[in-house]
Image (cartoon, rainbow, N blue to C red):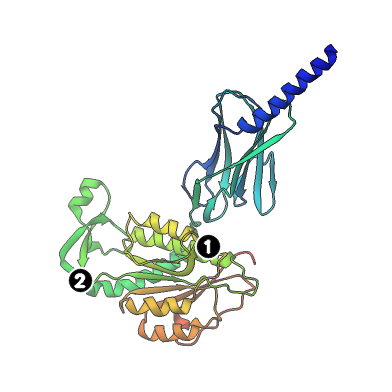
Amino acid sequence: MELIVLIGILLALFIAEIIYYRIHALDNLHLKVEFSKNVANFGEDIELIEVAENKKRLPLPFIILKFEAPREIKFYDMMNTSTSDLLYREDMLTMKAFSKHTRRIKAQCTKRGYYVFPRVGITTSDLLLTERFTMDFNNESHLVVLPEILNTELMQMLTSVTLSELQCRRTLLTDPFTLAGIREYGPNDPMNSINWKASARTGELMVNQNASTCAQKVHIFINLEYYNTKHSTSLLEKSISLAYTYLIELAELGIPASVYTNGLDVISGAPVISETDLGSATLDERAIMLARIDLKQPAGSFVETLEKYIPATESDDFILIISPQFNGDFRPVLLDMKSRRPSLFWLMPGYKTTPDASPEAEIAPSYMRWEVRGND
């Protein structure tokens, strides 16, 4: 009889424990997984910070912290991590009453883009490990990985072409009687522009910067239409990186620029366009705009982008077309634009096996093929 009573008591306690944990196991339980920063450079190391809190008196014998992360964020420690279309990570630990757990996971940013955690959740159980309880959490942390900064001879050549196109007109357009400021001496500055007093104060050669009667600009048009039937994106990524590196070079030279793409923003779905003059305050904003281009979405019409924005440019402005696509319907439009904008220049990224664009005679002097290592 005593044994039956004992069994009854144990059974009642077991049922009570199950019911209590069913109701309260997930109460005041919180999980947040966030990136250590919101904006990172290509190739930079960051941390994923995992914070779990049990804000109640009820202890949890174990919890499994689960989250899904983009594959482009490469963990240095792949323990408890599986890979498919995403990275799936699970970490197990015990949580006492009113306890907090923090774990930092080091990772590398291996690709440009806008990243979030698709799913963050916790699984726990009752004290007797008979049932499991799961909860997902809203997680608003995001990371923008900026495009790669290229270090190639092409950039030096492209900068040289840009300066040669602008320099001959700048002499004619510069007002020698109006001083806009003083800056460091550059290799393309004439010796008679050196400000010797400012140079003596700073210990470096400084030059007078005269105001221009008509400020010339650079306009960058990036064609992000798929360039083959496989819808490959590697050359499109190179095009975005090239445009970003070029923007940095232009900013250092003090040349205002605009950016026009037919690529779509991953959040708004709108074409990524920036007509604002380039300055130190907006370069970071443009880097983020380029980083958020979603190449999984088919780009809009590049012809429409050209026809909409090139007519608004000045005849003396330098126009750079970056397009891996070379058989598109933009070729006749490009030919027409070239007749009205003599400074228009076409740069085509391609692999060694990529056929040459064979541009028309009118465009050929303003065409350059950029051979990229690798293949699709």
Judging by the rendered image, the residue that carries numbered circle 1 is 294
Residue 153 appears in view: no
Tell which tag, 2 or 1, sits nearer the viewer. Answer: 1
Q: Secondary structure at mark 2?
A: loop
Residue 135 in which image quadrant: top right
What x and y, as percent, mark residue 34?
52, 42
- Mark 2 nearby-residue class (10 Å; few <14, some 14–19, many ≥20): few
Which image quarter is the N terminus in?
top right
Q: Nearer the viewer, residue 193 or 311?
A: 311
- Mark 1 nearby-residue class (10 Å; few <14, some 14–19, many ≥20): many
Q: Could you tell whether 124 is left or right of 137 in the image?
A: right
Seen at 32% across and 77% down, the residue is: 312
Q: What kind of residue is marked 1?
A: Asp
What x and y, as percent, mark residue 67?
62, 43
Judging by the rendered image, the residue that carries numbered circle 2 is 213
What x and y, as percent, mark residue 163?
35, 69
Which image quarter is the C terminus in?
bottom right
Which residue lies most toward the front here?
Answer: 1
What x and y, as percent, mark residue 101?
57, 29
Q: What kind of residue is marked 2?
A: Thr
